[in-house]
C-alpha cells in the first residue's frame, strides 16, 4: 500500500533527497581526491554508501534506490563517462539489492548491512569487468576487494549508525 504524504511532507522529502544527493556527490568527489596508494587500483572508501545506509533505514527502500541511481548518473555526468555508469550501476544495483534484503532481517545491524553492501559493490564491478574482458583472472583481484569492502563498509556503517543514532535522539 502506497503511503500518502501531505504537500508539506512531500516538499520536505524532496528537499531532503536533494540534500542527500548533493552530499553523495560531494563525498564522491572528495573521495576521488583522497590518494589511497596501497598498490591496488580501484580502492575507495565508499563514503556515499553511508548516505545510502541512512536512506535505507531512515527513509524507505524506494527512495534509497532512487538516490543510488541518481548518484550514479549525476556522478558519471559530472566526473566520468559511459564506463563509469556501467561499473557504478553494476556495483550499486548488487549492493543495494543486498542491503535492501538484509535491512529487512530482524536484528541485522546497519554496520553489517554496510559491510555486505561494500563487498557486493566490489563483486558487481569485478563481475562486470570479468564479463566485458572475457577473463576469470580478476577473481584473484576480487579476493582483495572483498577484504577492502568489509573494512570500508564497516567504517561507513559506523559513521552512518552514529549519525542515525543522534538523529533519532533529536526527534
Image (tube, grey):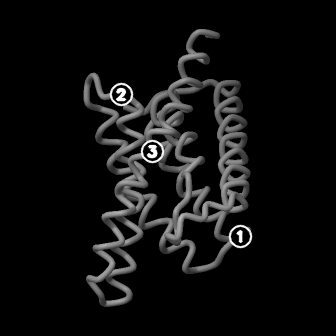
Reply above or below: 61 against 164: below
Reply above or below: 75 against 64: below
Q: Secondary structure at mark 3?
A: helix
Q: Secondary structure at mark 2?
A: loop
Q: Which residue is mark 2?
A: 109
- At x 49%, y 74%, the residue is 86
Give the mark nearer the N terminus: 1 vs 2: 1
Q: Which residue is mark 1?
A: 79
Q: Quadrant of residue 120?
A: bottom left
Give the mark nearer the N terminus: 1 vs 3: 1
Q: Quadrant of residue 29?
A: bottom right
Q: Secondary structure at mark 1?
A: helix
- At x 36%, y 63%, the residue is 144
Q: Nearer the viewer, mark 1 or mark 3?
A: 3
Q: Which residue is mark 3?
A: 153
* Spot occupied by residue 152 in the image (x, y as percentages of width and height): 48, 47
Amino acid at each position: 500500500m502506497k503511503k500518502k504524504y501531505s504537500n508539506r511532507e512531500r516538499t520536505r522529502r524532496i528537499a531532503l533527497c536533494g540534500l542527500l544527493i548533493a552530499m553523495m556527490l560531494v563525498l564522491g568527489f572528495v573521495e576521488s581526491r583522497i590518494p589511497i596508494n596501497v598498490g591496488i587500483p580501484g580502492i575507495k572508501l565508499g563514503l556515499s554508501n553511508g548516505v545510502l545506509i541512512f536512506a535505507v533505514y531512515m527513509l524507505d527502500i524506494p527512495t534509497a534506490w532512487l538516490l543510488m541511481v541518481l548518484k550514479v548518473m549525476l556522478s558519471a555526468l559530472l566526473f566520468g563517462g559511459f564506463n563509469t555508469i556501467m561499473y557504478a550501476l553494476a556495483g550499486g544495483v548488487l549492493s543495494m539489492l543486498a542491503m535492501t534484503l538484509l535491512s529487512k532481517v530482524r536484528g541485522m545491524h546497519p554496520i553489517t548491512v554496510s559491510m555486505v553492501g561494500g563487498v557486493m559493490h566490489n563483486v558487481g564491478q569485478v563481475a562486470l569487468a570479468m564479463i566485458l574482458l572475457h577473463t576469470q583472472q580478476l577473481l584473484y583481484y576480487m579476493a582483495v576487494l572483498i577484504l577492502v569492502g568489509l573494512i570500508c563498509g564497516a567504517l561507513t556503517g559506523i559513521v552512518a549508525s552514529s549519525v542515525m543514532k543522534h538523529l533519532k535522539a533529536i526527534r
